[in-house]
Structure formats: C-alpha cells, structure tokens
Amino acid sequence: MIRRNRSRILGAALAALAVAAAGCGSSGSAGANGSSAATVNTLVIANAVKVDTLDPEANSVNESIWLDQNLYSRLLQPNATGTGLLPDLAQSWAISRDGLTYTFHLRTDAKFSNGSPVTAADVVYSIDRSRKFAGGWGFLLTAVKTVAATSAHTVVVTLSQPHTPLLADLAMYAYSVVPEKLVKAQGAAFFQHPVGSGPFMITSFKADSEVDLARNPHFYGTKPKVQKVRYLIVPNDNTRVLMLESKKADIIENPPGNLITQIDKTPGLSVQLFPSTRVDFIELDEHFAPFKKALVRQALNYAIDRKALVKLAYQGHATPGASFMPYKMQYYDSSLSPYPYNPAKAKQLLTQAGYPHGFSTFLITVSGDVAGQAEAVVLKSELAAVGINVSIQSYELTTAYSKEDGGHSQMGERYWTNDIIDPDEVATFGADCTGGANAFASYWCDKQVIQAVAAARSERSAAKRQQLYSQIQQAVYQQSPFVVLDYSPYRYGVGGWVHGFHVSPLGSYDLSLENLTVSAH
C-alpha cells in the first residue's frame, strides 16, 4: 500500500468490511476518581486462514490449532516460553524407575463447558482416538502399549520401551480431551459446536468467515478477563492491516513484512515480533527426477541468496536458515551455517548431476501471502540465473497444502512450527520417511537417520540425545531433502489498547488470553 493513497483505499475497504467486522462491545466501570472508565469485553482477532476443523485430532493448520487450544484441555500444557510443561487436567504425575509406566492424577474440579465432569475415561478415549486417527499424530506415540483409567481421576500410560518425549507429546493439541459420550453420540456433528474444558467455548462457527467464542463459565483455571473472542477470517494481508488501522480488529496475524515500519509509525499501533519455532523452507518432492539427486538439491542451496531473501520478504526481520530444526530450540546444532550464496558452485553441481543446462519445474505458493509471494519472486530469479526455470503456481492455503502433499508436487513453499517442546516431533515428521509424513512430503529416506530418530526417542540421557540430534541435523543439511531458507518470527499487528498479548515460540497464545485486557478504543 502506498502511504499517499491510504485515505482513499481505507475508505473503500471500510465500506466493504462493515458487515464482516462489527465493532467491539464495551461496558462501563467506575474509576478511582469516580469517573466511568470504559472497558471492552470482546477481543477481535483477524486471521489469514480459514478454519480447517475444530477436531483436535485432525488439525493441520496452525491458525486452527491455536484457536482450538482455547477450547480444549490436555493432561499437560507447554509454558509461555515453550521450554517446559505445566499441569493442566493432570495436577501431578509419576514415572516408574524403568520409564515404562506414567501415572497421571487428574484434578477433581474439571468440567466441560456444558457442566459435565471431565473423567479419566474421557482422557483415555481422547488419547486413543487420536492415536488411531488415520493421517494424524499417532506415529508420535508408537511406544504406547495401553492407556487405562484405573479410577475416576487416574490415568495410567504403559509403554513398550522408554519414550522420552511422552510428556511433551501428551501436551500436544492433538491429544486434547473431548467428552466421550457426546462425541460417540454425535459423530462429526459434534465438532460443528464442540464442548471442551478450556477457558473459552464456541458460540458460533463459520469456518470461512467468523468464529465466536465466549468465556467458559465452568473453566477450572484462571477466568479470562475478556468475555468474548471473535475470530474474523481475512485472507488478504493488506485488508487485515486496514482493519487494524480502523480499529475493526484488535490483533491481526502476519502483517506484511513490507508494512511493519509503516504500522509501527502509526500512533497507537505496533507490530510485535515473537521468537518462534518457525522454519521457512522449500519442499523438494523426490518423485520429480532431478530432485532424486543430492547434487541437484545441494545446487539449489548454493543458488539462493538467503540474506537478500530475508531483506525483501521480511524487511530483515528473520534469520537465514541452516538446520531444519527450529532456531535455538532444544538440541539445535549451532555449528551449522547457512549455505553461502555461490551461483558458480550451483552450476558446477548441476553439471555433475547431469543437468548442465538446468531444467524446468514449478513452485507451489499460497496466494494472499505477501511475504511468501515476495520470497517466490526472489527464488524464481535466483534459480533462473543457474538455469532452473521455475513457474509459480499460487493457491489458497489448504489447496496449496493438498497439492504439495501426496507425492504429486515438485517444489513447495512451506514452513513448520513445533507443537511440542521436544524436537522429536519435527525430527519424526521431517527426517524420518517412515514416521507418518514421508519426511514432510519430500519422500527422502536415509536408514541411518531413521535409526538415529528412533534412538533419540528412547534415549534418556540428554547428552546422548544431543549427539543423535546433531547427527540428524548434519545429515539433513548435507543431503538437503528440503531447502531451508530462514527462521522468521511470529508477526502480529496489535492495537495499543490491547494489554498482555503474548505468543509462545510454539505459536500458542491461550495462556495470554486468560489474563489479557482490552481498553476502550
């Protein structure tokens, strides 16, 4: 958006947004001096992506995952810094000396939003349901033999072998607890108006346009200070910025990198950059002949100027990437450096691989993603310089993901973020082709890496786990089944009238919504 045209563009956009973005509700409260201080009871968040599902076992889109974490509870939950675990439904737990039995003691006051009690049977049902879900996250819990309710408030998990990430896994959104009787009775219809035990509950659900939440009156934890949260689905990046500027939204997701400075200069607005576990990369599908060769995959790494990419796509608000694991997370290998920009080396490797004149391919991107589109333009130009002709194909996010998965892609612009505090998720998902995601749809397989991933899961020594994860990271770096581009922060545009919004490195913000307040605006 050009600054001198802001007024004209803003006026037109507001007319179009009048129906979709209703204003916030407010109520009055007496101040210390006897005056009336207006307080807003509704928080409005504008997200970029439609909701894929409210079923936690089937979530695949971050925006839906982070929304769902306000609706459901789990046995445990990550802390606000994404570095440790907190009690949730489980007030305490014990691990046997051999590491094969975990006993969880549930709080006795937990209720679902309809007032019914949360029982150990609900926990067992929910975990087993997610373990069995086809295409889900059951591959993280392959060491689990049984999950049993030994009393109304006790759950025992028995393993076939030690599984160090178990507590982190059970704090994942996929293992959220749902009421067994209602889900069995209603089936898929339950998730059109689900009942959970989190701090908020659903009051209205339109996946493509708006989701409304209200405070759960039966929530056992900190009662949120805001009474309602309204999620508006607004795919266009610039439109979300206009909504923030006009105070039709309190918080917007992913403001374009090229508008960060502009937003920060606007009185009362700011862009907040939160440390993240996000890794931006290019997926290379090895069903496409050139990408079967490691030399070609390495050539792509040398052909890309990551510093230029970060500057153009993120205005410098990102870090050039090396390891496929999130930046500085647990067991991150800091000895790896980003591939240097060396087009001559890229051409040499292509010639060695049998492609002296390059080849043609396509890159799938997400339409409406300003940073992603800028990134794609840089990639197309830099790869053309070494003889690789790239056509850009843009689709809505869920369509893009479906085309990139399943072995029918060539290049895909992707990113991942961790959902758990342990690196097992990203290692199993991204480096183990037998782990359930075909090495993030690259179909790259390496026996030694697969063995190292398995060994790291069962290893209880932190020092030995570091060695194994370093081995995995170095193998991925050298063989390049995907091209790691950068580590970018979570970006949110936030009105100055919002107090206490915080996003953890895992992307969740449910803990901050329990204490967040919104002033009149």
Image (spheres, grey):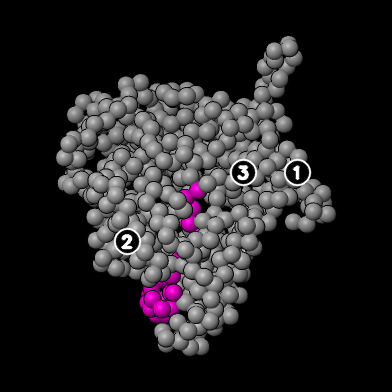
Q: How many marks?
A: 3
Spatial CA distance of label 3 from label 2 is 35 Å
Q: Is 285 contained in the magenta span?
A: yes
Q: Circle 2 sits in a helix, a strand or a loop, which is it?
A: helix
- Which residue is under mark 3? 272
Label 3–label 2 contact, CB within 8 A: no
Q: Name the amino acid type tagged 1.
A: Thr
- Which residue is under mark 1? 266
Q: What percent of the width, then of the height, locates residue 399? A: 50, 61
- The magenta-colored residue range is 276-298
Q: Residue at (27%, 30%) from the top-left corner? A: 93
Instruction: Point out the tag, 1 or 3, that comes first from the N-terminus.
Output: 1
Relative to 20, does residue 103 appear above or below in the rendering?
above
Q: Residue at (29%, 68%) from the top-left corner? A: 446
Q: What percent of the width, then of the height, locates residue 4? A: 83, 54
Q: Name the amino acid type tagged 2.
A: Gln
